[in-house]
Image (spheres, grey):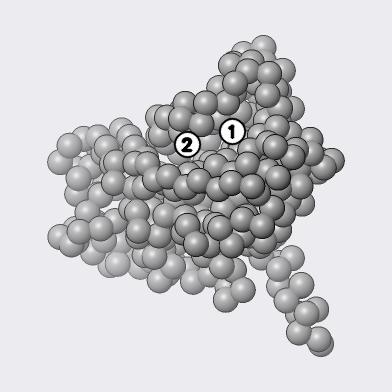
Amino acid sequence: MPATTTIDSEMIALKTRLKATWESGDYGVFATYLEKGALEFFDRVNIPSGIRLLDVGCGAGQLTLPAARKGIHVTGLDLAANLVQQARTKAADEGLTIQVDEGDAEDLPYPDASFDVVMSLIGSMFAPRPELVASEMSRVCRPGGNIIMGNWTPEGHIGQMFKVIGTHVPPPPYFPSPLLWGDETTCRQRLGGGVRDLKITRHMYPFEYPLRRPRWSTSSLSTTGRPTGRSDRSMTQARRRCTMTSPRSGPETTLRLMERRGCWRNTSSSSGRGRLART
């Protein structure tokens, strides 16, 4: 079998697994603990009303709904069918007119130059073919428009957590790390050719979890945290006990923090924001 055919079949299988992973559990619940940081991000990008906005990887409407409340003509898109339905239900409950589509960031179902702004907060960075994500976001953004991304950085807390997860669930060799979207050089390589100007800034992203017991945290992340659930199942009971009591700095210490405080507030994770002007 030719190598390209093998890679194509492996990519199809990978994308099927990714969709199933993102649809497992209830990320809509988990996302509520990220809401404060998401709204801070949205306030910083300052998108005016009347703008045609595409929210790629919109989840359960974390930013899609606030955009609609502001008078922005927003369209949301997500790979996970259950989250698309949650976003639609929330919009209907508020009487908001929002188009929310199930779709793939690597193959956006919209004509060229359909939007003034294309935005993705911790969403399209997880697609396995970033070159397609970059080209598709550029394609559907009108000339003179803006592409805005908020991505985790390799150096931040989430980046370090992903390294831990990767030791238990190694990604396929043909799947580049999503954290590369948080690397300035990589962003410029992927998006620089189709844009007139590229600006990258870093901000702290706050997390607030109302967690009172380490036991609750591991079970909760298994059912609501999407990919973390799979890594949790791959760990032995002994490894989980070690993780919950590790004195070292890094992701392992978060469970100890939660136990002492009753509520974990973490602001150590940095999110790189790239704002690009289409040529």
Find residue 31 and name its label.
2
Marks 1 and 2, the one that precedes in the sequence: 2
Is 124 left, or right, of 155 in this rendering? right
Find residue 157 and name its label.
none
Dot 2 alpha-carbon crowd within 10 angstroms: few under 14, some 14 to 19, many 20 or more: some
Residue 23, image x and y in percent?
61, 47
User: In the current view of this chain or complex, which residue is farthest to the right?
Assistant: 111
Element type at marker 1?
loop
Can you say whether 67 is above or below 156 in the image?
above
Dot 1 alpha-carbon crowd within 10 angstroms: few under 14, some 14 to 19, many 20 or more: many
State the residue in front, 212 or 75: 75
Can you say whether 259 is above or below 227 in the image?
above
Do tag 1 and tag 2 residues touch (Cβ < 8 Å)? yes
**Residue drawn 46% across the image and 30% down it:** 44
**Residue drawn 42% across the image and 30% down it:** 40
User: Which residue is denoted by mark 1 in the rendering?
Assistant: 60
**Quadrant showing the N terminus:** bottom right
Q: Amino acid at mark 2?
A: Ala
**Quadrant showing the C terminus:** top right
**Residue drawn 79% across the image and 39% down it:** 113
Element type at marker 2?
helix
Q: Amino acid at mark 1?
A: Ala
State the residue in front, 106 or 12: 106
Can you say whether 39 is above or below 257 in the image?
above
**Residue drawn 69% across the image and 53% down it:** 194
Can residue 133 be seen here? Answer: no
